[in-house]
Structure formats: C-alpha cells, structure tokens
Image (cartoon, rainbow, N blue to C red):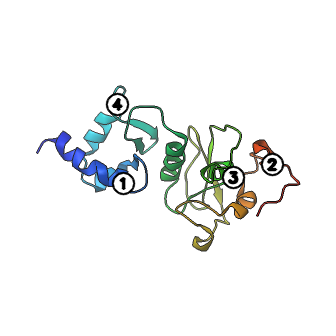
Amino acid sequence: MSTTVRSQLFLPAAVDAGREGVATHAELIAAGMAKSTIMWRIQPGGRWQRLLPGVVLMHSGRPTGRERLLGALAYAGPDSVLTGMSALRLYGLRTADSRRVHVLVPHDRRRQSHAFATVERTRYLPTRDQIRTVGLLPTANLAAYSPRFEPLFSCGLSRRSRVG
C-alpha cells in the first residue's frame, strides 16, 4: 500500500475527533502516518500547513477562527483551557477582532507563546468540574481567568457589567 493511500485512511479519524482538521504530529504518527509524510504535506505549496509547532491544519487555505482556537489548544497540550476573549468567542459573544488566542496551562508546563497563541501558566487552573466542554470554561468563570493584558472592555463590556 502506498504512503499516500495509507495516510489518507488515517485522515478521517483525526478530523472526526471534533478537531475540524487540526491535529498534532504525535496524534498523526500514533494513527500510523509516517513523519516524512507529515513533513511532505506541510511543506510550502503542500496540501496541509503548519499552524503552530507540532500542530498541522489539514488543508492549505486560510485557517478559520475556530481552527486557530483548536490549534492553540492542541499546541498547549492536555489540561489546557481557552480563556478570556478567546473562550467568549466560542460562546458566540462578539468581541474585538483579536488575532491572539489565549490559553491557560498548568504552571509546571514549559510551553511558550508562539505566533497567534498566547500561553499563560497558572497555578490556579480550573478543575474538571468547572470545565463544561473540552478546554472551555463556563461564561461566568471567564472574567476571573481573563488574562491581565486583555481587559473585558475591549469587547464592549464595561467594568460595571455583570457577568453571570
């Protein structure tokens, strides 16, 4: 079986996992795809693109806002959560058009901000009970976890607005 045909067999599993075409190199390799195939597909002019280090987007077009959010979560690793305006955008709140995606990670993780992903380490990561879906806090908690450099009034909320 050729590499191209074999790699296409594993593509739907990565896409159908709720990640909308966003996958890490490790996930694709675990699914049986050769690292050389991944590298060949993300080269300039290839079928895929490198979204962040170790994270690929399985198409060559411009990434959507949701794909960028999912890519930042994949880059940040397990137990990471979207925070601030990034999370509020997934809830449908119209926020200021921010190109940055803010992610909270456990304090002991050594992950740095890169490209559009702003990674903030915290000792007070929300518990699993506080997280409604994978990597997303309830709206009432987002103000408390909002990064200090992204004030709430940037999306039209005033400091007097009640959250929750």
CA–CA distance in space, label 2 to label 4: 42 Å
Residue type at mark 2: give it.
Answer: Leu
Q: Which mark is residue 43?
A: 4
Residue bearing mark 3: 84
| Tag in front: 3 or 4 | 3
| Tag in front: 1 or 4 | 1
Q: Which mark is residue 157?
A: 2
Q: Nearer the viewer, residue 121 or 59?
A: 59
**Residue drawn 83% across and 59% down?**
162
CA–CA distance in space, label 2 to label 1: 35 Å
CA–CA distance in space, label 3 to label 4: 33 Å
Which is nearer the N-term, disc 3 or disc 4?
4
Please identify the quarter of the rendering in which residue 107 is found: bottom right
**Residue drawn 63% across and 41% down?**
100
From the viewer's perspective, is 22 left or right of 4?
right
Q: Nearer the viewer, residue 63 or 27?
A: 63
Q: Is residue 38 above or below residue 84?
A: above
Which is nearer the N-term, disc 2 or disc 4?
4
Q: Are marks 1 and 4 in contact (CB under 8 Å)?
A: no
Name the quadrant of the C terminus: bottom right
Q: Secondary structure at mark 4?
A: loop
**Residue drawn 32% across and 50% down?**
28
For label 2, count other residues whose C-alpha is less than 10 Å away and answer few (under 14), some (14-19) or many (20+): few
Q: Nearer the viewer, residue 135 or 107?
A: 135
Please identify the quarter of the rendering in which residue 114 is found: top right
Which is nearer the N-term, disc 2 or disc 1?
1
Q: Nearer the viewer, residue 125 or 131?
A: 131
From the viewer's perspective, is 39 left or right of 66?
left
Q: Residue furthest bottom?
A: 129
